[in-house]
Image (cartoon, rainbow, N blue to C red):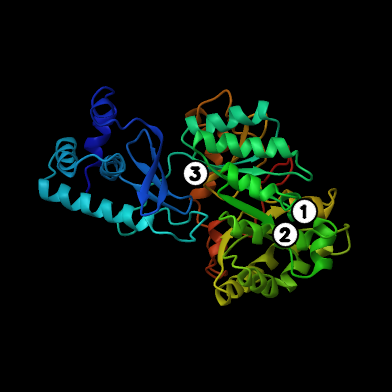
């Protein structure tokens, strides 16, 4: 239905569409009963009238304003005849037959999203059966936030919800404080956020930590998995960590928390990537997030540099990984590559991981500073003191959007899924104050 311009005019006049149909911009949280269980839906309504519908932290679909009106009505139990009438009234030129057909499609969409699956993290942001043309996201889908004390964490979580960012991943450090980690997940769940935790196996599989986090409402657990070989994994992640990583993911599956294996690409990990993915698949793990560490330093000139791939070597490495993932029926999530820093221990850089989980994710530091997924590691604003509209119009975030719009496929490169995350020849900076060439 191509009636967006009329809807935008209607939406711009507060007191008309807002009040009449209850379509307040922001996040709306629903539980939809399906048999003996219930599906958790998040509906985000943007100021433009477009929306984003998320189901069980597994699937996400972008909606036009007509879809937003219908999805919200169906989730709230509004009668069909009322929804058809509202759609005809809201969209000039719409007929009752068109409205009824749109209603049928949205109901089928909700039914399809209500079926259990293993589609996390959310990749299907444009459902071709409902919204064939791409609807740009008005604001991020998720935020990565380092674990901090509740005094700092809780205002950030609240601001994410207020700004319509429905998903948070808490980045757990080595030996995270038990009470702080559990409280962060409990608070995020209380607010209504989709919640994940990322860290080492040794820090996540400690005692009853995963069962406690699951009970608190954890949706996904991201665990660093470097290799099936203990010497390769443990030299970077810590003694005995490989076995703890396996334990963490198996426990997550048992507690119905979605496990995601986080795999950094280095020379040693690439050498065992097929065995690593095969082992993960054997444990029932189907999601793997990968990021490359790249360097321009010649071999032998810096400690650790010999184990890091050169930027142009990441391209054939990505081909190898994608072939291995296809053989083992693994779903790959590519994170933007990062640049090796010769003055930092390699293990520290590996476990710091990517700046964010992709282009729909922001990084928010405990003091509220916001960093774009790519580009110079300079803040785009502060979530605690600025609105998202102000952050989005900052120089740093506008620069990110410009880069996002640039074509990343090259004539001399294969068409790789990783190119959606970023060009492998341009790893992003990794430390505060580091710049990047335009």
Q: Quadrant of residue 3?
A: top left
Q: Quadrant of residue 318?
A: bottom right
- Judge the density around disc 3: few (<14), some (14-19), many (≥20) Cα neighbours within 10 Å: many
Task: Please give the name of the residue rendered at 33% of the width and 59% of the height, measured from the top-left corner.
Answer: 128
Which residue is identified by label 3? 141
Q: Earlier in the sequence, mark 3 or mark 2?
A: 3
* Res. 85 in view: yes
x%, y% of residue 43?
39, 41
- Judge the density around disc 1: few (<14), some (14-19), many (≥20) Cα neighbours within 10 Å: many
- Mark 3 lies on a secondary structure that is loop
Q: Distance between the Cα atoms at labels 2 and 1?
A: 7 Å
- Mark 1 lies on a secondary structure that is helix
Task: Please give the name of the residue rendered at 46% of the width and 50% of the height, measured from the top-left corner.
Answer: 56
In the rendered image, the quadrant that contains the C terminus is top right
Which residue is identified by label 2? 245
Is label 3 or label 2 in front? 2
Find out whether the residues at labels 2 and 1 contact each other: C-beta distance under 8 Å: yes
- Mark 2 lies on a secondary structure that is helix
Q: Earlier in the sequence, mark 3 or mark 1?
A: 3
Q: How many marks?
A: 3
> Is 168 displayed left or right of 246 in the figure?
left
* Res. 364 in view: no
- Judge the density around disc 2: few (<14), some (14-19), many (≥20) Cα neighbours within 10 Å: many
Q: Earlier in the sequence, mark 2 or mark 1?
A: 1
x%, y% of residue 191?
51, 33
Which residue is identified by label 1? 202
Q: Distance between the Cα atoms at labels 3 and 2?
A: 27 Å
Q: Which circle marks residue 400 in the picture? A: none
């Amino acid at each position: 239905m191509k009636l967006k311009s009329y809807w935008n005019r209607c939406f711009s006049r507060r007191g008309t569409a807002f009040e009449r149909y209850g379509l307040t911009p922001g996040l709306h949280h629903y539980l939809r009963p399906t048999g003996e269980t219930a599906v958790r839906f998040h509906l985000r309504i943007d100021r433009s009238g477009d929306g984003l519908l998320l189901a069980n932290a597994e699937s996400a679909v972008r909606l036009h304003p007509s879809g937003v009106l219908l999805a919200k009505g169906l989730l709230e139990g509004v009668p069909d005849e009322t929804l058809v009438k509202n759609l005809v009234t809201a969209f000039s030129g719409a007929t009752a037959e068109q409205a009824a057909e749109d209603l049928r499609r949205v109901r089928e969409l909700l039914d399809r999203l209500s079926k259990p699956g293993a589609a996390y993290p959310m990749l299907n942001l444009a459902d071709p059966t409902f919204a064939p043309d791409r609807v740009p996201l008005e604001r991020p889908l998720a935020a990565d936030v380092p674990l901090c004390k509740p005094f700092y964490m809780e205002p950030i979580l609240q601001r994410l919800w207020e700004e319509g960012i429905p998903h948070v991943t808490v980045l757990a450090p080595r030996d995270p404080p038990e009470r702080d980690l559990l409280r962060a997940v409990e608070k995020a769940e209380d607010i209504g956020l989709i919640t994940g935790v990322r860290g080492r196996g040794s820090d996540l599989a400690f005692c009853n930590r995963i069962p406690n986090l699951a009970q608190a409402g954890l949706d996904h657990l991201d665990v660093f998995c470097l290799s099936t070989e203990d010497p390769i994994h443990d030299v970077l992640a810590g003694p005995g960590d490989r076995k703890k990583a396996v334990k963490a993911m198996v426990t997550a599956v048992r507690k119905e928390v979605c496990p995601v294996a986080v795999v950094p690409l280095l020379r040693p990990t690439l050498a065992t990537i097929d065995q690593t993915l095969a082992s993960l698949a054997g444990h029932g793990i189907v999601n793997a997030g990968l990021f490359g560490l790249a360097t321009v330093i010649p071999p032998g000139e810096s400690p650790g540099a010999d184990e890091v791939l050169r930027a142009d070597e990441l391209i054939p490495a990505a081909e190898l990984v994608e072939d291995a993932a296809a053989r083992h029926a693994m779903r790959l999530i590519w994170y933007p590559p990062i640049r090796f820093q010769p003055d930092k221990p390699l293990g520290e850089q590996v476990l710091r991981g990517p700046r964010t989980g992709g282009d729909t994710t922001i990084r928010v530091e405990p003091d509220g500073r916001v960093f774009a997924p790519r580009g110079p590691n300079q803040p785009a604003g502060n979530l605690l003191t600025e609105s998202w509209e102000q952050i989005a119009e900052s120089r740093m975030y506008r620069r990110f959007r410009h880069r996002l719009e640039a074509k990343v496929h090259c004539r001399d490169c294969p068409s790789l899924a990783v190119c959606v995350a970023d060009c492998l020849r341009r790893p992003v900076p990794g430390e505060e104050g580091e710049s990047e060439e335009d």
